[in-house]
Image (cartoon, rainbow, N blue to C red):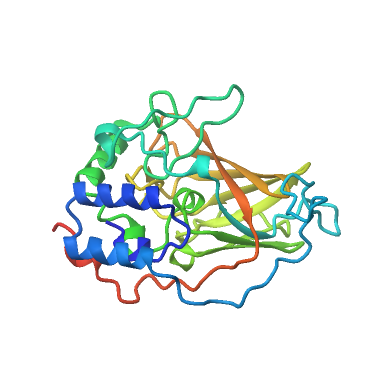
Amino acid sequence: MLLAKWQNMRYLSAIWIVRLLMLMLMRRLITITSISLLLVLKATTASAQWPAFSTPDVPRTADGAPDFNAPAPRTPEGRPDFSGLWELWARSAANPNRGATGGGADQPASEPTPGVPPAATFFDLGANMEGGLPYQQWARDLRDQRVADDMKDNPDANCLPMGHMQLHMHPQPRKIIQLPHLIVMIWEGNSGLRQIFMDGRPLPDNDPQPWWYGYSVGHWEGDTLVVETIGLRDDGWLDVNGSPFTSKGKITERFTRVNYGHMVVDVTIDDPSVYTAPFTVRAEHGIMLDTDLIEFICNENEQSTEYFDP
């Protein structure tokens, strides 16, 4: 159903595209013409973007290859530097263990690792959690209704800003720009832009206007960047299937740059109006070299919504 967006995703594997097509076919949201167009776009060489260039300051092995296991770079202040272009790790890609609650064939969930949060997934955030997400009954009913409606109201399907977890799990890359008192995250998907303030300001307590990306402040706990976010909208979607989130909730992210090539983000969702208990899931990303974000304007020539069921 997200045809207009997926046509432009440079980094999807052929398997991923086939699975998306199967999902869309089962959800009756595209025509045979649309399928043909997507396959043509996949097979066609992308138009040129920036001329070829090399990412600077990349650690190298003795044979000159990038050393992704080298220590994480640090800022002049001695903090881990998260700056760079990041993509979703393959093992973090959309595990669709969705069963009757979402599109796609069943697949076994990831085996849990003791002491490690379950892996987040794009379609069903709780696919790797025993028993799934701890919904209150009204929230489970709303998620099921959103699935029954073919997820057509997902913000991503309507070229609107995605929620934090959909962005963390999105196949399109994201860029982090780290300054001493501000961290900026730029997503290629829907041209998302988020600010994380590191200047010591507190979270607002004056009933702030709800925002798509909320209000985020960060601090350091050793080498871990801890980001707290409140003030999100009431109509939030945590995943493609529509797990709800409201303005009463809080998101806490713990960013760790394990080494030069690997970033781990443990995300705790605490929304007592929706879930019976807080829960934590993990997203993982890998550094991307010798490339950059491309301009992505979702509404440009957007035609997929005309095929949505009423």
Q: From where the camera sits, is residue 285 visible?
A: yes
Q: Give the vertical position of 141 relative to 303 (above or below).
A: above
Of residues 306 and 47, the one drawn nearer to the viewer in this rendering: 47
Q: Position of residue 92 (x, y in %)?
A: 51, 42
In the image: residue 3, left or right of residue 193: left
Residue shown at 79%/46% (left/top)? 71
The residue positioned 56% from the left and 31% from the top of the image is 117
User: Horizontal placement of 24 versus 54: left or right?
Assistant: left
Image vertical order of residue 49 relative to residue 199, above or below: below
Residue at image coords 28%, 40% = 102
Q: How many marks?
A: 0
Residue 211: x and y in percent read 46, 61
Q: Is residue 159 visible?
A: no
Give the residue at x 77% y 62%: 180
Residue 200 placement: quadrant: bottom right
- Name the image quarter holding the N terminus: bottom left
Quadrant location of the C terminus in the rendered image: bottom left
For the residue pair 308 and 30, the one nearer the viewer reads as 30
Quadrant position of residue 299:
bottom left
Frontmost residue, 285 versus 254: 285
Quarter residue 65 falls in = bottom right
Q: Residue 113: percent from the left, percent from the top? A: 57, 24
Q: Position of residue 115 (x, y in %)?
A: 61, 24
